[in-house]
């Protein structure tokens, strides 16, 4: 008796099953949800960017992933502990540099997969990296972990790590060469010294004050206050104080300068009617943690909720530190009779081209603070100018909603950044983080704090809620632009690119 039975008349027919390209071994089905409820993941074609392939592959169960290609960059008898250790070290540099958890996991899996380890499960949280490899289903897994204790923003180092991962996944870098290049990356000095960063901080604050209607005198005052706050933060950091106190101390000089300008500006010839509030607003732009906010929202949108919660808690602590520093000085200034009027910084600016130039100057200074490569500075600056132009047209000229205009401008920033990152095979952060600087909610944050110190809780709640909405619109817009670029660009890179890279000896 045959084990197969004909289907009853009228019974629903099971859809035809077709092999899925990119998967080897075992049954494979077309891209529909099977009866067990697990969506089928279709791998990008060979030659696609390693980020796209590894993101898709890591979503597959370990038993359904294709086997690594024979040979490649791995030695015939590759050392399992050394591969896992190299993977963790690369992941540590990426996570400490501010990269999103999804990209860190993709990089870790790509490195291990390139050296012949298929059954690998990387795990990324805010401070802990783990990786587990099971040689066979009947053998116990080998697990290693590494703790991220120090974080530092250096996008030049981040780009170098991306190039290293790119070479490893292309089977162009042996294990020993990878260790050597990783050691060189760690030893490399930052491209800009501490005093250059201090000057960039002052330039950023001065340009931000121009965005809210500041005059040249306000530009100088905001810049001096920001540089003083930066050196004060460097001093506290050298003594080992947590970042909370560093941000609180760095916010005080800007608030103090605003109070002094309000009280004694009439002593300076031609300085009557200057916008003292713009000084404090510019100082806040130099301190708001836009990088951490974007990373937190990105992790939340990609499903890394624990890491997103930790990053968001970090943002909250840093913002509270800024609030404490500014509020203490503002309260003392109001008590001493300072007349800080928010309307001074809300007046319409008659020269939009000045604001565009100020936005580009702010972006350039922000990119220097983030230790971006010199070749990235021009592109990031142009991206920031375009973002502010879009925001100004939608909000200031067309009268649109400020939150919607911010989200639209941030979406273009993310789209342009993802295009440039794919063109140059690097992380998207250097092209995005600095460009959103002009859109940060510095003025709304300051107005909320000022209303709080002047005992107007309703106005304070309105302004602080507006600042939070702008921050979320900024982060979501950047992430949406990134995802649109990923969906639109599905074609693999041209073949000559790999050959050209080999000829350079990488």
Image (cartoon, helix red, strand yellow):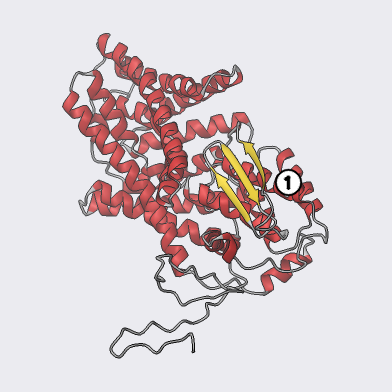
Image quadrant in which you'd find residue 415: bottom left
Residue extending farthest top: 336
Residue 186: x %, y % from top left: 71, 40
Residue 92 coordinates in the image, percent (x, y): 63, 41
- The front one of 49 and 76 is 76
Q: Image height check: is 469 above or below 53?
A: above
In the rendered view, would you say 454 is above or below 488? above
- Picture residue at 46% right of the left edge, 77% below the top: 30
Would residue 358 be seen by someone viewing this image from the given angle? no
Toward the viewer: 386 or 25? 25
As rendered, which of 174 and 338 lies closer to the eye? 174
Residue 104: image location, x then y, percent: 57, 49
Q: How crowded is mark 1: few (under 14 residues within 10 Å), some or many (20 or more)?
A: some
Would you name the residue on which mark 1 appears?
A: 182
Which residue: 43% across, 65% down? 38
Query: Left or right of 208: which side holds 371?
Result: right
């Amino acid at each position: 008796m045959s084990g197969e039975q004909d289907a009853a008349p009228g019974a629903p027919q099971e859809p035809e099953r077709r092999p899925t390209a990119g998967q080897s071994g075992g049954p494979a089905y077309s891209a529909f949800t099977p009866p067990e409820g697990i969506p089928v993941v279709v791998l990008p074609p060979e030659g696609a960017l390693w980020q796209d392939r590894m993101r898709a592959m890591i979503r597959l169960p370990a038993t359904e992933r294709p086997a690594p290609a024979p040979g490649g960059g791995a030695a015939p008898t590759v050392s399992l502990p050394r591969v896992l250790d190299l993977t963790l070290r690369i992941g540590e540099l990426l996570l400490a540099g501010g990269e999103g958890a999804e990209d860190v996991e993709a990089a870790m899996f790509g490195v291990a997969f390139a050296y012949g380890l298929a059954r690998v499960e990387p795990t990324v949280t805010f401070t802990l990296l783990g990786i587990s490899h099971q040689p066979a289903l009947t053998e116990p897994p080998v697990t290693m972990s590494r703790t991220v204790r120090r974080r530092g923003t250096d996008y030049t180092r981040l780009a170098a790590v991306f190039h290293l991962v790119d070479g490893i996944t292309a089977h162009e870098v042996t294990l020993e060469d990878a260790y050597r290049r990783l050691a060189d990356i760690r030893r490399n000095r930052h491209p800009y010294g501490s005093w250059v960063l201090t000057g960039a901080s002052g330039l950023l604050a001065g340009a931000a004050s121009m965005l809210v209607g500041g005059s040249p005198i306000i530009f100088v005052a905001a810049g001096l206050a920001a540089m003083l706050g930066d050196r004060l933060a460097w001093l506290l950091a050298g003594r080992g104080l947590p970042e909370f106190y560093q941000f609180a101390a760095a916010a005080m000089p800007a608030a103090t300068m605003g109070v002094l300008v309000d009280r004694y500006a009439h002593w300076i010839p031609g300085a009557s009617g200057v916008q003292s509030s713009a000084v404090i607003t510019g100082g806040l732009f130099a301190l708001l943690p836009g990088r951490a906010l974007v990373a937190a929202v990105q992790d939340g949108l990609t499903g890394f909720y624990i890491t997103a919660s930790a990053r968001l808690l970090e943002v909250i602590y840093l913002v509270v530190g800024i609030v404490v520093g500014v509020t203490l000085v503002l309260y003392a200034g109001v008590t001493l009779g300072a007349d800080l009027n928010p309307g001074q910084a809300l007046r319409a600016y008659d020269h939009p081209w000045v604001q565009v130039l100020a936005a580009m100057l702010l972006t350039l200074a922000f990119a220097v603070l983030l230790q971006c490569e010199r070749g990235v500075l021009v592109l990031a600056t142009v991206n920031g100018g375009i973002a502010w132009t879009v925001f100004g047209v939608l909000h200031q000229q067309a009268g649109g909603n400020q939150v919607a205009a911010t989200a639209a401008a941030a979406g273009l920033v993310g789209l342009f950044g993802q295009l440039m990152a794919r063109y140059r095979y690097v992380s998207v952060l250097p092209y995005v983080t600095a460009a959103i600087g002009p859109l940060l909610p510095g003025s709304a944050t300051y107005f909320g704090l000022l209303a709080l110190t002047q005992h107007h809780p309703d106005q304070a709640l309105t302004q602080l809620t507006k600042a939070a909405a702008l921050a979320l619109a900024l982060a979501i817009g950047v992430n949406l632009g990134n995802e649109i670029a990923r969906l639109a660009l599905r074609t693999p890179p041209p073949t000559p690119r790999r050959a050209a890279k080999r000829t350079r000896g990488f």
